[in-house]
Structures are given as structure tokens and as C-alpha cells.
Amino acid sequence: MKVPCTQTSTSGLRGEYEGAAADYSVGQDWHAYTPEMHERWRRLHARQSALVERHACRSFRDGLARLDCAGGIPRFEDANAILRPATGWRLVAVPGFIPDDVFFDHLAHRRFPVTRWIREEHELDYLVEPDVFHDFFGHVPMLLDPAIADFLELYGKAGARAMAMGALEMLARLYWYTIEFGLVREDDVLKVFGAGIMSSASETLHSIGDGQVPRLPFEPVRIMRTGYMIDRFQQIYFVLESLPQLIGELVGRDFGPIYEQWRAAPALPAGQCLPGETLIPFPGART
């Protein structure tokens, strides 16, 4: 399971922070990757790609195909040559977790931070910190979708206000249940678009194949009130009717009154359904 991308502390986490720029960017140093690291990427890519074909949303499948990164750890500069003309985004290499304000600033300027190191062999199935496979394979294909590209910029711009109002956790939950662990309905079938799901074989199958886990329609306030799990499968998922819905329900919406009303309230437990809520019917995916 992955922890939030907006984690502030780097204590005890891997990554070479010495020599990083003020915005925590570093060179990718692509030539430092060993043949074993590239082989590890190829195996991870092959395993996840089989699930992508069956369970990922159309935008993810199309984006992954355009990036053409099955052969080894990709060069960020090559990806940027595809991203910038398409949606104006570019990747910046970072050592690992970066402070919240820096993360928000990168997103607000259409720069996506990607961790440059890759997980070890014993971490193929479980990784606490996001590595280059999680960040690139899980996130970058969706940067080619206009709705996700626009949402992430807006999210970055919203960060400073959330921090100033003491509501960072609420905003982080919106990112968690969409960009990291979001589902979307396509042709009346549930599909995955969240990176935390897409970079984990077991979470992919759990998110759309477990008949016991609740799946609720996308509702921003409900999401911002809902706690989440960082060390196990998610206990609840939220489903978009389409990716543009992510922008349509948020553009022009004032989060200030929402923060003021709910920031002091305890988070709703992950997996708890409220009276009157309508669950997305299961089964939600065809195999």
C-alpha cells in the first residue's frame, strides 16, 4: 500500500536528498540504473500490464501505450517530449517524499514529481514509499488525459489555502480517493484510474473484485470527510461516472465553507456507510 504523496517528513525514508534544488528536484541520473533494475521494471510492467488490459480505464490504457515504457526504466526527458505538447505537463525527478508546499507548487505549475529510485526485489508486492514504478507507471499515463491534467493543476493551486485553513488532511483525502485510489464507470463497468491501485496487482483485484468493500458515487464533501488506510487495502472506494466529472464538480467550488464546517470533525472511519447512502452495485466489473 502507498502512503500519501503529500507526506512532509523524510525521516527514516530512503532517497538521496543532499544536492537537491530548493524545489527538491534532482537529476534522474538514468545511467546509474543497473541492468538488474531495468529487468525489475520489465517484470513489474509485464505483470501490471496484464491487469491494465482488463481493468484500467481507457485513458490509462491509451496513455500507457503512448509512453511505450515496457523495455526498462524510462527516461523522464522522453516522457516530457510526449507530455508537454499534449497537456503541458512535465516530469521532475525527486529523491522521494517532498514537503507539502513544494508538492503543491509543482502541481500548480504542471510539474509532476517522480521518485527516481526503484524498489528492491523483496518489495515487488508491497512498498510503503512510492518509487519510480508507482509514480511513473501509476500516475504518468493519466497526465495525458485532459480532465486529470486540469484537476491536478487545480489541486496544486488549492494547496496553499488548505494549509492556511488547517484543512490539509481534508484536501489530501480528495487526492487519495481519486488520483491514488479512484474508480470510474465506463460502459457500465467499473474501471481503475488511481495510481495506488494501478501499480499494485493485489489492490487492483481487490478494488473491483471484492464484493464486500463498499463503493460509493463520487461526492467531494463525503470524500473530504472520509479517512483512509495507508497500510492495507482500501476499505471504501468512490466512483466517478466519467473523468470529466472530477473537474465539473470542483471548478468554481469554494472549499472554504466546507473546511470551516468539517475540519475539526473526526474523520469518518474508512469503510463506514452513512444512513441513506446508495452503494454502487456489485459485481461492477466484467472479466
Image: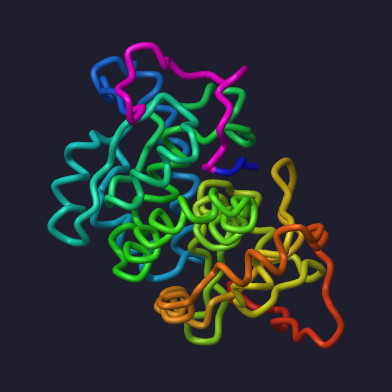
Residue 31, position in %: x, y? 24, 18
| Quadrant that contains the N terminus | top right
What is the magenta range? 5-24
Task: Name above or below for residue 141 compared with residue 185.
Answer: above
User: At x 70% / y 73%, what residue is drawn?
Assistant: 215
Q: Examine the image and state in which quarter residue 102 appears.
A: top left
Residue that extends furthest to the right in the rendered view of this protein: 275
Task: Name above or below for residue 208 compared with residue 162.
Answer: below
User: At x 72% / y 54%, what residue is drawn?
Assistant: 228
In the rendered view, does 115 fall on the left or right side of 262? left
Task: Name above or below for residue 74 compared with residue 58.
Answer: above
User: At x 57% / y 37%, what residue is drawn?
Assistant: 7
User: At x 36% / y 27%, what residue is drawn?
Assistant: 24
Residue that extends furthest to the top in the rendered view of this protein: 18
Residue 116, position in %: x, y? 37, 28
In the rendered view, does 158 fall on the left or right side of 281? left
Camera-nearest residue between 266 and 127: 266
